[in-house]
Amino acid sequence: MKPSYEVSNFGVTKYGEKASKFTLRGAGGVVLEVSDYGGKVVRLFTPDRDGAMKDVVVGGDDPSFWDGGDPYWGCIIGRVGNRIAGGRFSLNGKDYELALNNFPAGIGCSLHGGKRGWDAYVWSAKPFVDGDDVGVEFSRVSPDGEENYPGTVIAKVTYTLTKDNVWRVDYEAQSDEDTPINMTQHVYFNFKGESGGTIEDHVMTIAASNVTPTDAGQIPTGEIAKVDGTPFDFRKGMRIGERINEPDEQLEIGKGYDHNWVLDKGQGDAVGYAASLYCPLNGRKVEVWTTEPCLQVYTANWASYDQKAKGGEHLSFRCGVALETQHAPDSPNKPQFPSIIVKKGDIYRSSTEFRFSAQ
């Protein structure tokens, strides 16, 4: 099969910007529909063990799906993914105060870039075919002071489908001032389909011996804790629902899994194995490989379930799981965590691969 792409209209965002949709058909058979509106993943078709194709991500038919109660379904996240405590950090002797847009237990923080993060902009987009690969390159300029972050940032995110059914996400950014950057992709998988119910029967493996516990406001305490003997030990693979409802303080804080694992692979220029997700019902599987040192796993515990997704189906509790490769939450305020400060003129680079198969 030759790789190809199609471009179509995706409607108008709540900000009045016209959006497009790009349908990428990979040489290996995987089909990815994405929008230039925040790089949102609209549909992703992968084969099961019998070769049957199904859309395996949570998304909507037009931008209105993302207008309210949006837990960042399938979006590019930036400038800084995850939470910053109190919306405050200091850099080079200057204090910065960010908008508060998330209030776990009534405690305010800045989440996923602020009130209007990079997920809520229409990016410039260039689709391409390169040999056996097909993809689209998204780019935008985030001006100095956007969401009160310092520095003008030129950002680029490239989605590529390979002949081996790999969806690769490459991130690149450069700033004219020192600034924090921590980008990720917030796609939610459900290998039974978004109307297939809970993902608690999916088997998840995480190559991580440690996790970063949080306080009641879901901000890491700074501790790096062993997963041994806890519901957070997924090193050998376990059904997501096996222990998700156990009487554990951390699970009660997140209403399930909404936590950051410290990957055993560490950080590096080359991608390394981070996690896998497998559905025994149909054999669909994804392996996550990344250059990032951490993985946030979120089992859609806080989403608004009165939303109607594709086909008019209402979303259900724990209808998907997000596997967010990234640096740790609140890193600007935790010097013991790897830094997310990108120096003026330096180039931020990060890569993650979602390797699809069936067994």
Image (cartoon, rainbow, N blue to C red):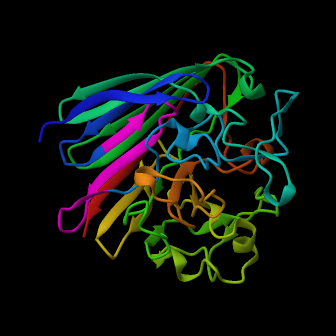
Above-or-below relation of 40 to 123: below
Above-or-below relation of 304 to 36: below
Q: Position of residue 131 (x, y in %)?
A: 18, 30
Q: Can residue 270 be spotted in the picture? A: no
Determine which quarter of the picture holds residue 67.
top right
Task: Give the magenta part as a residue range.
Answer: 32-54
Above-or-below relation of 113 to 106: above
Q: Is residue 46 magenta?
A: yes
Above-or-below relation of 190 to 239: above
Q: Nearer the viewer, residue 247 or 211?
A: 247
| Left or right placement of residue 151 versus residue 324 in this view | right
- Position of the C terminus, as image quadrant, is bottom left
Q: Nearer the viewer, residue 220 or 299?
A: 299
Residue at (40, 37) in percent of width and height: 34
Residue at (40, 53) in percent of width and height: 311
Q: Position of residue 39 (x, y in %)?
A: 47, 35
Residue located farthest toward the left when viewing the structure as drawn: 1
Q: Position of residue 122 (x, y in %)?
A: 52, 25
| Left or right placement of residue 193 versus residue 13 in this view | left
| Left or right placement of residue 301 versus residue 275 in this view | right
Q: Can residue 235 be spotted in the picture? A: yes
Q: Position of residue 253 (x, y in %)?
A: 75, 68
Determine which quarter of the picture holds residue 128.
top left
Q: Is residue 333 magenta?
A: no
